[in-house]
Amino acid sequence: MESAVSSAREPELAVVAGSLSHQRMVEIYRLMYLSRRVDDREILLKRQQKIFFQISAAGHEALQVAAALALKPGYDWFFPYYRDRALCLALGVTPAEMMLQAVGAAADPASGGRQMPTHWSSRPLHIVSTSSSTTTQLLHAVGCAEAGRYFSHHPEAAEKDSRDYRAFHDVEFHGDEVVFTSLGEGSTSQGEFWEALNTASNQKLPVIFCVEDNGYAISVPVEVNTPGGNISKLVANFPNFHFAEVDGTDPEACLRAFEAAAGHCRAGLGPAFVHGHVVRPYSHAFSDDDKLYRCATERDADALRDPLAKMQMRLLREGVLTESEINALEQSLDLLAAEAAERALEAPLPTVESITDHVYSGDLDPTSHDFASEQIQEQSQGSSLAGGGLAGSAKGSGPRTMADLINACLHDEMRHDPRIVVYGEDVADASRTQALSEVEGKGGVFKLTAGLQTEFGSERVFNSPLAEANIVGRAIGYATRGMKPVVEIQFFDYIWPAMHQIRNELALMRWRSNGAWASPAVLRVPIGGYLTGGSIYHSQSGESIFTHIPGLRVVFPSNALDANGLLRTAIRCDDPVLFLEHKRLYRETYGRAPYPGPEFAIPFGKARIVRPGTDITLVTYGALVPRAMQAAQKAQLQGIDVEILDLRTLNPYDWEAIATSVRKTSRVIVAHEDMLSWGYGAEIAARIADELFDSLDSPVRRIGSMDTFVAYQPVLEDAILPQPETILRAIIDLKAY
Ligand SMILES: Cc1ncc(C[n+]2csc(CCOP(=O)(O)OP(=O)(O)O)c2C)c(N)n1
Ligand SMILES: [Mg+2]
């Protein structure tokens, strides 16, 4: 964006060893003061109701400016949190750009009017879009650092490829880059804080974690969040870290701390943890009043530590600037902030028509013909199944299971695309590589990733910690750097710890950054019941919870060939995909198919007519497809001709196919394994009733499981889940209506 006011950051300044040069001190004060004045200007606008939210960096400026000055914007990477105005100013975000976000202007370069002020994003400066969610950004930082390391080990992976998502992702990397991420001390209570430290420590990643400790999380004092009241003491035993605990109101101490931290990271020694004690003179946010929960003596003591006042005193005391020089500098910065606000208030607003821009990729449409190569190809030479892949069952020609063809697709795509990494719980053949030569290998609890580590190495295929948010959060970091993480959540039943990352981060990255960033990761997730003994925690469905998330593609194949072709599209497209694999179908006789070759792809949003018919349309997917087939065959004996549509992808879904079939049959059942109430079928049924009312000869019928969880005892499981007989009864009923 052309900004009206130029960057606040001056060219690199030399640091006099041991002490700050006068020039450096003035620069630090300039940035700290400007940050405070932009906050003050925003507070004024908020009082005038010209902006709609305000949260400030007041009291944190010294720590933040020091961090920025120790690092390199556009070279290093940044995952800040909402208080980091001084950091971002010092990195090069302009006051004008900040004000454009505050008013919600179309030209707001961070989000186009979609995010609150101080929700940072800048591609040129390498500031990756962050959310309001405390702590999620730390795992993105970890994935980002892993991606940077990967590209520096495999520079060839940075090459573009016009055939897939790679065409739209420029890759930049430097061998000694550092990733910076920050959070408040209260946010260290989040599990994802510990999950991020875990991986950064274990993998010696060049991540600087900066805790800006102002002693409060809104109204909650530090000792409530942190046992003992000091986070540095709790994290001190993580291996490979460089630790620093500093007075965060002293810019010189902070600068030294960040320089040492960056040095540790750039040297490849591991991550760093900088804990700065700061103050919070402006309450938590505009809407908060800390007089309600802090006593006066405490607030007065804080006021004495205000970094801005302290730095001003230092400039005077050390003869760096005279009082009149300070006044002149401050006036020029006041003007800068005021001008930025005035211009922003005149800026055009986003159009209502633009609201749906960037929910999904506008560049690469996974429903397009480019992804249609559905004709089965002859088994090609050197096919995936000949080498690597599943042992035994996968070898030789002939029909293959869904498990085989998913595994084959992973092998093919990893050969085709060096940007793919595969990780998750137990997905490696063996974490201890010395064991690999002696053992067959695990390759996933369902063996879907078998042989991948053996063929592609431990840098591309590895086990994650047992932490689902860690898996998805890191995938987001990888994907924002242009890589393609294809990760596994071991069971759908355990996806919930990652829900925050999926709903608030993965699916939102493109929309909230107005198209600047994207995180097109693939999450492979075994789902569903009919396992006989799977019980509550290995049988859950729940796909409608995910189809209710804009920005996320949801795929649910019912047979081997579809799984192969749809997984290829999921990997090659540029949107995040939840790829649901029904565990019961992995090795079924139903739906086996020959290996279709390494280029076989199926577009999203195209249903398959599994069985043509004239009397009733049965819309379904997943494990209900074979059960619907059984029911339809029995119905045929009674003279009822059922047409079965397998949706194959749930978001997007093939409305045209549904409408065409319903217009022909005039009767429709929507059937799924998931619970009936508020399920996926409710949406489809409502739309049919709404748009196809005139074509219907009977009500729209739904089939789903009972509104309960799946029990262990098979008698109960059978009663809870829909069976072929349940479907047959509904068919007969509806025909008679
Ligand atoms: C996951 C999550 N839970 C709750 C909130 C609401 N919230 C916003 S800021 C905040 C307090 C954060 O305190 P701290 O981490 O100390 O940072 P500070 O604001 O003090 O800099 C809370 C609870 C949120 N944004 N995200
Ligand atoms: Mg705090």
Image (spheres, rainbow, N blue to C red):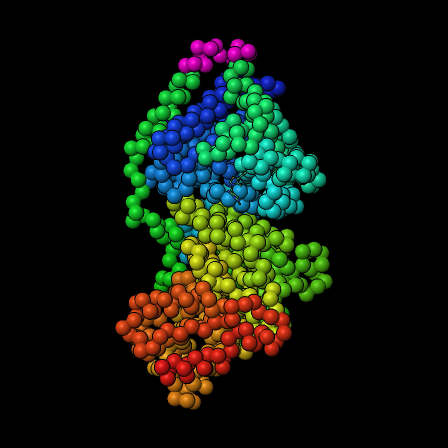
How many numbered discs, if any? Answer: 0
Q: Nearer the viewer, residue 664 or 556?
A: 664
Indicate left or right for 698 with 503 as reference.
left
Residue for point 39% across, 52% down = 359
- Residue 322 magenta: yes
Q: Which residues are magenta?
A: 316-328
Q: Is residue 687 visible?
A: yes
Q: Position of residue 23 (x, y in %)?
A: 50, 17
Q: Position of residue 571 (x, y in %)?
A: 47, 59
Quadrant of residue 682 within the rendered picture:
bottom left
Q: Residue at the left extreme?
A: 694
Q: Nearer the viewer, residue 733 or 651?
A: 733
Q: Please tell me whether the stretch drawn in magenta is mainly helix, strand or loop.
A: helix
Residue for point 38% across, 55% down = 364
Indicate left or right for 56 with 44 as reference.
right
Q: Position of residue 615 (x, y in %)?
A: 35, 82
Name the image quarter holding the C terminus: bottom left
- Residue 431 magenta: no
Question: Where 420 sits versus 68, above or below?
Answer: below
